[in-house]
């Protein structure tokens, strides 16, 4: 799916790579779209839970996502295909992975530690900032092969920018 998109993903290639058969794939997932949805849900859960979420440290969480995107750019590519081919608007992935994070942001807001505003909007803003140098970027996609000094510079900018955006 990486280079061909969802529409270009062929069941024969998928089942060969998974060492399974069509009956098992369709029995378990129902369709190629069902398989893709399961992959998106799995990868979303993995990346959003790769590091601890602390509403009092949204800058640190954003930097963790930057690093996770460097290690695993495949999720961002899958999300881009999903946006292009199936869901041009609305949420991506399973909302249940966001609920605990939104509740934590709400509690931090009530305690005066995170700026007022819709918790989901703040969450989306932090995600977007963390993905500024990901494969979904319209400007530049960072890679692990770049000098560590470049990554350190971006991490510092990201941390400071998120801190300024979410601090009351």
Image (tube, helix red, strand yellow):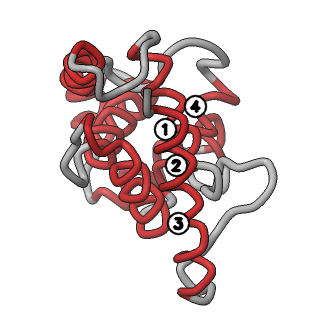
Q: Quadrant of residue 129?
A: top right
Contact check, label 4 and label 2, Cβ < 8 Å: no
Tell me which numbered mark, 4 or 3, is placed earlier along the sequence.
Answer: 4
Tell me which numbered mark, 4 or 1, is placed earlier along the sequence.
Answer: 4
Marks 4 and 3 sit apart, C-alpha to C-alpha, by 30 Å
Nearer the camera: disc 4 or disc 1? 1
Image quarter of the C terminus: top left
Between residue 109 and residue 34, name the one nearer to us: 109
Which residue ends up furthest to the right in the rendered image? 139
Contact check, label 1 and label 2, Cβ < 8 Å: yes
Residue annotated with mark 3? 156
Residue 18 appears at what percent x and percent y?
A: 30, 56
User: Could you classify mark 3 by the number of other residues whose Cα lies within 10 Å: few (under 14), some (14-19), or many (20 or more)?
Assistant: few
Nearer the camera: disc 3 or disc 2? 3
Residue placed at 52% from the left, 49% from the top?
130
Residue annotated with mark 1? 127
Up-down relation of residue 86 to residue 17 (above or below): above
Badge 1 element: helix
Give the total number of marks visible in the rendering. 4
Residue annotated with mark 4? 82
In the picture provided, is 60 more to the left or to the right than 108?
right
Residue placed at 64% from the left, 43% from the top?
5
Marks 1 and 3 sit apart, C-alpha to C-alpha, by 16 Å
Residue annotated with mark 2? 130
Residue 163 appears at what percent x and percent y?
A: 46, 44
Between residue 63 and residue 79, name the one nearer to us: 63
Tell me which numbered mark, 4 or 2, is placed earlier along the sequence.
Answer: 4
Marks 4 and 1 sit apart, C-alpha to C-alpha, by 17 Å
């Amino acid at each position: 799916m990486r280079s061909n998109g969802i529409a270009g993903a062929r069941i024969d290639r998928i089942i060969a790579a998974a060492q399974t058969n069509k009956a098992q794939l369709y029995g378990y997932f129902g369709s190629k779209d069902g398989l893709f949805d399961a992959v998106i849900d799995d990868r979303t859960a993995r990346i959003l839970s790769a590091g601890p979420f602390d509403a009092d440290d949204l800058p640190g969480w954003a930097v963790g996502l930057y690093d996770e995107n460097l290690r695993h750019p495949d999720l961002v590519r899958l999300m881009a295909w999903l946006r292009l081919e199936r869901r041009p608007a609305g949420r991506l992935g399973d909302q249940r992975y966001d609920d605990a994070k939104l509740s934590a942001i709400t509690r931090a807001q009530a305690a005066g530690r995170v700026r007022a505003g819709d918790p989901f909007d703040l969450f989306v803003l932090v995600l977007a900032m963390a993905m500024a140098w990901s494969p979904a970027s319209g400007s530049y996609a960072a890679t692990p092969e770049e000098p560590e000094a470049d990554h350190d510079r971006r991490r510092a900018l990201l941390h400071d920018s998120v801190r300024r955006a979410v601090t009351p």
